[in-house]
Amino acid sequence: MLAGAAGAAALTVALPAGVASAASLGSVPRGPLPFPFTLGVASGDPFPDGMVLWTRLAPQPLAEDGMGGMPARPVEVEWELAADERFGRVERRGVATAAPESAHSVHVELAGLPTGREYFYRFRAEGHISPVGRTRTAPNPNAMGPALTMCFASCSNWTAGFFTAYGALAADEPELVLHLGDYQYEGTGGANAVRPVAGPETATLAGYRQRHAQYKTDPDLQAAHAVAPWLVVWDDHELDNNWADEVPQDPGKQPREQFLARRAAAFQAYYENMPLRRSSVPRGIDMQLFRRISWGRLATFHMMDTRQYRSDQACGDGGRVDCAPRLDPARSLTGAEQEAWLLDGFRRSQSRWDVLGQQVFFAQRDLDPAGPQRFSMDAWDGYVGSRDRITRGWVDAGVRNPVVLTGDVHVHWANELKLDYADPTGPTVGTELVCTSVTSGGDGTDSTPEQDAVVAANPHIRFRNGKRGYVRTRFTGGELRADFRVVDAVRTPGAPVSTKASFVVADREPGLNPA
Ligand code: FE
Ligand code: CA
């Protein structure tokens, strides 16, 4: 690697400086650095001319202080981007600094590359070479471009089982991956953990860093990151269950100042461990995560953050109820700024498919038609005015094919979206695909009579399945195809993966057709 004279010279100059600063710190480990690429590699946020390349150095990923067993000194990391997997045609190379204050993570933000190209990348630090990742630039923004295979997933709880779904997703070799949140969980799973996690419930920067590092050691997750660039957004568990803006699920247990410090720590560790652009570097308790990624004229991905700006939970901490505040138009799931940004994006869009990559169940979902526990207040059902404004926004803007993608609920669903859910005969104005969890909830079951009754009570819901898995999509100018992939079991490794159901959405015809 880096046989070129310039690269080799940079390395030989850099190393003595690093050694010298390490020696001056006295107590740091001496001698050669053990293999530091235990967390794999990743890439993300592809633009037409570049993307982010990511890695993090951690020879001891489970180190309790969250520093991955790294010495407390900056380390130079060389990177290479090539047109071929064997790095015979290296097109870009450079050196980045992995610094202790960002847990020795590396974010290389590239620009100026040609559109619609596949690339391979790797890193080297102190004589060690990383695994190879594959990435790409987004297609020419002014052309429809080729078909896109995109997989999306959510809710990967280490303690609930094995990440077989991530391995299957990698085997599909998508060009793009969306992660819709609950990438990791703050809890420990207690005595029921299929796979134990190191450390207590995450609440400190060290704890979140350690937890992220442990997750990244999973070979299936590493394969999924290495196969394609990701677009990530968080949900609640990257911080704490069912949090809303500056309020934890149970304010009685976490004083405000304590929760805000926890939020800042979780955001910092999230940024460090995800292939995000500099625009997402956290500032205190804030982090810019909603953003727009275009895939030629074929698709626009509006990646949303429905946690950081939402109105407080009402009528209980996200539980299932039927209460008046859910209809209060002043309540918002997005915040005013993000809502305006989204509606503006609808008006400007010239895409064949406009995809909302977001967290929580969008369609109305009446869970208990005859009883008191009708609606999840943690989802859009708890923020009906917010949902109405966004649905009306894409209808009024004439968005050609609106598609909402959702995670959070640990069940596959496919829904037809309505302006008025009280009128099942009214027009369908969009389509929602909800991915089940990667592991959360354990092995799962296809369905039960009670769950079948929920589907029957919601005529716009066309499909439901309670196994684990992910969703594979294929976008063309004429249709969107969705394959609901399921894993037989997650409590044991290596279980078979299959397609439970497939649907097609035709251009200009929102709604679901069996494929
Ligand atoms: Fe979850
Ligand atoms: Ca969640």
Image (spheres, rainbow, N blue to C red):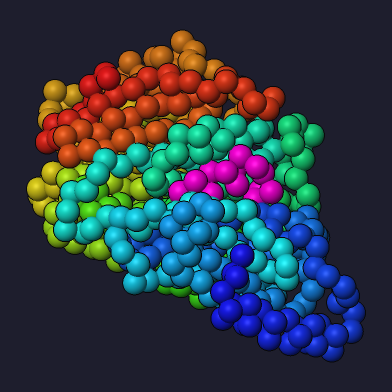
Residue under the image location 46 percent in, 49 percent down: 228
Range of the magenta residues?
A: 215-228
Residue 221 versus residue 111 in the image, above or below? above
Q: Quadrant of residue 274?
A: bottom right
Residue 216 located within the stretch drawn in magenta: yes
Q: Nearer the viewer, residue 174 or 125?
A: 125
Q: Is residue 62 left or right of residue 44?
A: right
Q: Nearer the viewer, residue 437 or 60?
A: 60
Residue 491 versus residue 230 in the image, above or below? above
Q: Is residue 261 left or right of residue 92?
A: right
Residue under the image location 62 percent in, 53 percent down: 131
Residue 265 visible from this viewpoint: no
Q: Quadrant of the N terminus?
A: bottom right
Number of callouts: 0
Of all residues, the one furthest to the top in this rendering is 449
Q: Nearer the viewer, residue 390 or 509?
A: 509
What is the x, y in percent for residue 499? 43, 21
Residue under the image location 33 percent in, 30 percent down: 482
Please tell me whether the stretch drawn in magenta is mainly helix, strand or loop.
Answer: helix
What is the x, y in percent for residue 2? 59, 69
Q: Quadrant of residue 420?
A: top left
Residue 262 located within the stretch drawn in magenta: no
Residue 284 versus residue 248 in the image, above or below? below
Q: Quadrant of residue 33?
A: bottom right
What is the x, y in percent for residue 514? 26, 18
Q: Is residue 327 left or right of residue 471?
A: left
